[in-house]
Every structure is written in structure tokens, then in C-alpha cells.
Image: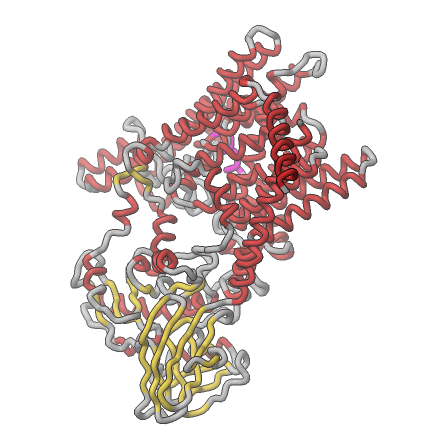
Amino acid sequence: MQIYTYFLITFVRQVITSYMKQFTVGKVLPYVITILAFYIVTAIYFYPEVFEGKSLAQDDIIRYEGGSKEVRDFNAANPEPSMWTNSMFSGMPVYVLNPVFPDQPIAVIDSIFKGLFFSGKAAHMLFQTMLCLFIALAVFGVSPYVAAIAAAAFGLSTYNLIIIEVGHMTKAWAIAYAPLVLSGIYLTFRGKLLQGFALTALALALEIRANHLQITYYLAFICTIYGIAELIRAVQEQKLPAFAKTVGVLLLAAGLAVAANAGRLLTTADYGKYSQRGKAELTPLPGEEAANPKDGLNRDYAFSWSQGIAETFTLILPNFYGGSNNEKLNSRSATYRFLEDMMRSGQIGNQEFVQFTTRSPFMYWGNQPFTNAPVYAGAIICFLFVWFLMIATPVQRYWMLGGVLLMVMFSWGSNFALFNYLMFDYFPGFNKFRSVSMALSLAVMLMVIGAAMGLQRMLFISEKEYPDWLKKLGIAFALTGGLCALFFIISGSFSFSGPADEQFGSLIDAVKADRQAMFRSDAIRSFLLISAAAVLIYLHIKQKVGLTVALTVVGGLIVFDNWSVGKRYLNADSFSPQAKEAAHALSPADEAILKDKDLSYRVLNLNNPFNDAATSYYHKSVGGYFAAKLRRYQDLINRRLETEIKYLIDSLQKGRMPDFSRTPALNMLNTRYVILNPNDAKGVLRNLAAMGNAWFVSELKAVNNPDEEMATLATLAIDSVAIVDISKFPQVKTGTYQRDGASIRLTSYAPNRLTYESDSPFDGFVVFSEIYYPDGWQVIIDGQEAGEFVRVNYVLRGLNIPKGKHKIECRFDPVIYRRGSLLTMIASYLLVAVLAMSIGLMFYKKS
């Protein structure tokens, strides 16, 4: 054994020694400098967060923290994580909200990509985006300094910055890992099968782990287009066997990546069946939007954020459509001066003036409901990308241009209905997603990759290799710089009118003048940047300017371009001291409610309840914020809760105390408190009609379908009668029950485990004020399994209880989670082992 150990150690030492001899400072230094530069760029851009302790408000993260607070606290204190929370929408699984799976090896690698030192800070998303694209470009064969410039440009592009500001973390992570996936596929097709397998598996595992399936779904289209381009080349070069072998390797890598995320994917798919993405059950009422007859979202909802076709020109001219709904007005602008006059005349107050001038909602005039920033790739990036398409190989040209065009068409949504409605109706999975405009982020990614390759080619171009380079340079300049100049010249022909302009009244003329001024200013700006880059490249190819000067100046212009436009939307003013802490501060209303020490009851905040997760931070909320609520709970909101909430508000506005007997849906959800004013301890209303945690009923009544079940809720005497849809639960015995002397109470509470004690002289039927979910809830009575819940009252749990005294324990322990977790753990360690083996073999071959 000692001899084997000796030989193994000797072999490893010789391999490492031999390999290290191939390294020189000159080879390693550019990569070290680049990574250090990424840390510096990130720290400078996020200076208020990194050095001053300030933070971004990040509305989506604040909502996430509110909705997941209960389960995060529970998981931190317990070895067995909970996959259920009662803090939002009266209870729901947290598979897609706060997934916890045993994938520690991949989690460690993920944290390295996120910059380690920036852990817990929004800054990590910028570092991660730059680092991933840099590595991907290195795999594509781009020199480190060119790759660093392109990576910085991508990280600083407006879309990536604005999703950091609003807190779309999972989207930012998925976009960051997307180029790594492409580079892994590229490496595999270049014949590096083992390294390509390892990189593809790791990158795709990280991509799926980011948990933003819409970006991953769009990325799959780009990968498919690339695969088709490689297939065409394989046919032309008669290398189909090698192509088939490569595809087989990639499929194995994808399988390993999927297995490493089995827990997430399986539970998400299970939840999706019962969420708004699943099939609708109710027949639409007159005037109600028709439901998608198949699984998936309604068409209008899915395409509500569709990019205007002409709005795509923001890729090269950021203020093409007025920028955003949060523009800071120049003090010399017509709108600023008009608002200033209105303030002086008393038509608006000082607070409104400051609000309208620092975050002006007037400038954007595009088709989307609103936008926080235009999707700007960079003027020079657009120029370099067009140049690259002209000099690229056919495979490169077709897959990159095809990918960009497809993502652009997806982003147009309902504005390109002929194509997108066809995809929505017939292509698998397309109808599961909304906000299709985000597809443009992957178009930007491809454009930056192409621009980097174009810049690389320009710097080392040979006039003999490309005798028509000047002609192609001129065409690229005409299609980008010339386009910007044309826009400036014909700007007077644009209407600068938006769909929301009617509400601006007398302000509209000033607003239109400023929109035109912003348009013209950015047209000149983009033209000058493209012109400067084109001239430098021309001089370099003519050997009038050296390589170092050309790369430094062009690279500096690229970074300056995206940095300066990005600063319009994410800057020092975006940060504030303890922004998140302030958002979660305990309000007087919260303090008043928390004096009630009962184990479980629900709270309704009348202030926009179904787009608010602040209430969930401290309470079990009737409302919440989540884009994929349970389908039946959304039905309850649409058909019953909104009506009852409107009744409460109308009564209070008329100075009358609401009659809670008219709010049966809220009562059966055990809504004990209603928040009228969060900032006032007296702004809380107690609902004495709330039904409590569970109750015996005297009758279980049959209905025949979901429509009848929902309609009956409006008049149901919920304290004594429950309804069950016998088309869904034909085994349930309906009828009357004796309940005199019967009682049931909650004795122990945890989000995934509820314990009750019942006492009844008769067999009875109990309704629990908990949301029914088909998979995972187990019922144990006196230590023995007792079957499953049935769904009653459209959304609640019901159970037959035998007479006598009993301990009833309800546990959420879904089999699909346990199986998925086991597969995730095994595949995660296997993936990292394959990665280590590929690196080891690479050392061995080089030695």
C-alpha cells in the first residue's frame, strides 16, 4: 500500500511540476489583472453599498424577504427544512420561492462566481455577470484584454443594471451563467469532449440552479440554433458521425445538470400544475378575460410587457423612446420649467415638484405599461457586432444573427402576433411565461459576444486576409453610425406621442419637446462614439495607430459608453442608508396585532393586499406578492376576496363599521385582523366573525363542478355547512353530522406541521382554515396514518374525525421533494467529481 501511495504522490508531483513549467507570468498576468479589475469596477460602481453601508431598495428582494421570512427563520433553527409557508396567500408551497436542496458542492462554486467578498450585497450580480462572460469569451478564443472590455460592457448594460436595482436576482444569475453554457457547447464542438462535457454540465447546472426558468427556456432556443448551424457544417464537411458523438456528449452533460437540479425541477413542475400556469377550472364570467383552454397563462397577461417593434432601436440609441418612467429632468428642460411654473402658481406642491423632476413619469412613450430603463447594448457594441457578422464564418454568422433575431421577435410579443401567438398556442412551454421583453437581454449577450470577436479580429486583421475590409467597415459604419445620423436628421417626423399622454394635460407640449431633445441628443452621442471607434480601427489597420493605443482607446470608449448610460438609472442616488431595514420596520399596526399571542390567525392589509409582502414579514397574510399563485387561490381572489375587500373599504369610507357576516371567504380563512392604516396602532380592525383554525360542521353538501362550488361560496353558512365537489372527490360521503359538544383546537404550530386536539361525542367532519394542496400533506391521528384531506369550500382542507378525544397531526412531507433532494445530492457530487477529473486529465495531457 505504501508503494502505491509513493508512486501516486510522485506521479502527481511530476504532472504538476511539468504543467507549471508551461506557465509564465506573461500568460497568467492578464487573467489576474482582469479579475482584480472586475473587483475594482464592481466596488467603484457600488461604492455606496460596499464602502458606505448603504443599500438598494430592491423591491422584489424586499417582497421576497417578506414572503419567505417565516420559512427562512424556521429553516435556520431546524435541521429539516419546511417546504410550506403560511405567511402568503393563506398558505402555499415554497418550492419556487425559497428552495432548499442539498447541492453544497455546486453552491460553493456558485459563491465563487458571485465574488465571495460581495456575498450578501447587490454588487455580486455585476461581478458575476462580468466574470462569467469573461470566462466564456476566453473559451471562444478571445484575448483576455478584449474579453475583459466586452465583459465589462455586458455587465454595465442597462438591462443588467436595472434588474439589480429592482432585485430580480434569479434573472440576473440566469443571464450571467447563459454565456458559460454557450461556451461549454462551443468547446465540445471543437473536439474537447471531456472539458466541454464538464464545462457544459457545470454551467447548465448553475444556470438551472439560478431558478429563472424563463431565461433558461429562451437560452435553449439559442443553443438549438447553434446546434443547427453546427449540423449544417457537419453535413458540408461530411462529419456527421463526429457531430452525433458531440451531441451525445452534450446530452449526457445536460442530463447530469438536470439531475443536479432534480429537486428544483420536479417540485416546480409539480407546483406548476396547480398554479396560475396550470389549467383553469372556472368558466369565465361575462366581461372576464377568457382563460387559456390549455395549461398556461392567459394570452393578454403573458404578453402584457411586449417590446414595441421600433423600441428595439434602444439597443443603439437609449433615449429612442424617452428612456424610462423614472427619468431625472434637466433643470433646463421644458418640462422642468413648466413644472416649476406650476409650483410657483400653487398648482402643485413642492413635494410633487421634486417627485416629478427627479423620477419623472412623463418621458417614456413606448408600448409597455412602464419601464425602469431602456435595453441598451451600447453604440460601439452594435457597430462591432454588425462588422463581425460581415467577416465571421458562416456558422458564427448564422447562429449569432439567428439567435439575436429570434430573441428580438420574442421580445416584441403581441406587437408581432403572427409569430408569437403561434408560438404561444402550439409550442410546448411558451405559454408558461410572461414579460417576454426580457428575451432582449439574451440578444444583448449575443451581440456583446459577437462584438468581442469582431474587435479581436479587427486588432489582428490582415489586409491580405480581408482585402475588402474597408468596404465592410464602411457598411458596418453606415448601418449603425449612419442610422444614428439619419435618426437625428428625420427626428422632426416622429410624433413623440405615447399611449398615456392624455393624462398629462397642458404639460404635454413641453413633454414632447423634451422627448425630441433627448432623442436628438442620444442620436448625436451614439454617432460620435461609433465614428470615433471606426476611425481608430481604420487607423490601426492602416498601421497608423499601434495595437495598445487602439485597444485602450476603443475599449475605454466602450466601457465609458455603457457606464455613463447605466449611471442614468443605477447611480449613487439609488442607494440609501438601511433601505431594506426601513422597508421591514415594525409598524404601529404590526405592534398592535403582535400583542395577540395565539398560535395562528391571518391578517388582511387593505392597502394593495395582493401586491404586498410587507404584511407577510410579521404575520400570516391573506395577501402577498408572487407571480405564480395557486390557481384556485387566484380564483378565490377574483371571484370572492376582491368583492369582500371592496365591501370593507366602501363601508369604512362611508363611516360605517363593516358587517363581517358579509365576508364569508375572509372569515373561513381565519382573517382575525384587518389593517386600515399601518402607521396607526388604532388603524387595525378586529374581525370577531373569523372562524378560527378549525371547526366542526353540521352538513357536508355536494356540488357538481368548480363553477357551482365557487358560486355557492357567496351564500354559504360557513360556520355550519361545507361544500365538496364530488366530481373531484367522488369517494367523500356527504350528508349531515351531529356536532353538539364537539370541539377542536390548534395546540402546536410550525409552517410544515400543525397539531390539533379534538373532542367529540360523535363522528364528525372538520373544516380547517388552511389551504388545500393535493401533494404532500399527511394526516396522522393518534400516531396512525389517517388518509388524506379532501378539498372543501373551493380552497380549504376537510377531514372526517372519529368520535372521542384525538391528537391530529398534519405534516407537509412531499415525497417528490425527498426524492428530488436525494437525486440532487448524488448528481451534485458526481458533477464536481467529473469537473475535477477533467481538470486532472487536462494537467496530465499537458504534462
Pick the residue in front: 113 or 345.
Answer: 113
Which quadrant holds the N terminus? top right
Q: How many marks overall?
A: 0
Rendered image quadrant of residue 392: top right
User: Relative to 497, does residue 254 appear above or below in the rendering?
Assistant: below
Q: Is residue 412 left or right of residue 611?
A: right
Specify the farthest residue to the top: 544
Residue that appears at 57% across and 51% down? 260
Residue 255 screen position, x and y as percent: 64, 51
Whether residue 402 can be seen here: no
Which quadrant holds the C terminus? top right
Q: Main secondary structure of the magenta part?
A: helix
Specify the farthest residue to the front: 2
Residue 433 screen position, x and y as percent: 53, 53
Pick the residue in front: 763 or 470.
Answer: 763
Residue 843 screen position, x and y as percent: 63, 31
Pick the residue in front: 359 or 65.
Answer: 65
Rendered image quadrant of residue 736: bottom left
The colour scheme used here is secondary structure
Q: Is residue 827 left or right of residue 590?
A: right
Q: Is residue 685 left or right of residue 328?
A: left
Residue 87 screen position, x and y as percent: 35, 62
Indicate whether residue 314 is drawn in magenta: yes
User: Relative to 42, does residue 806 appear above or below in the rendering?
Assistant: below
Which residues are drawn in magenta?
310-317
User: Relative to 78, does residue 695 appear above or below in the rendering?
Assistant: below
Indicate whether residue 155 is drawn in magenta: no
Whether residue 514 can be seen here: yes
User: Relative to 843, does residue 548 appear above or below in the rendering?
Assistant: above
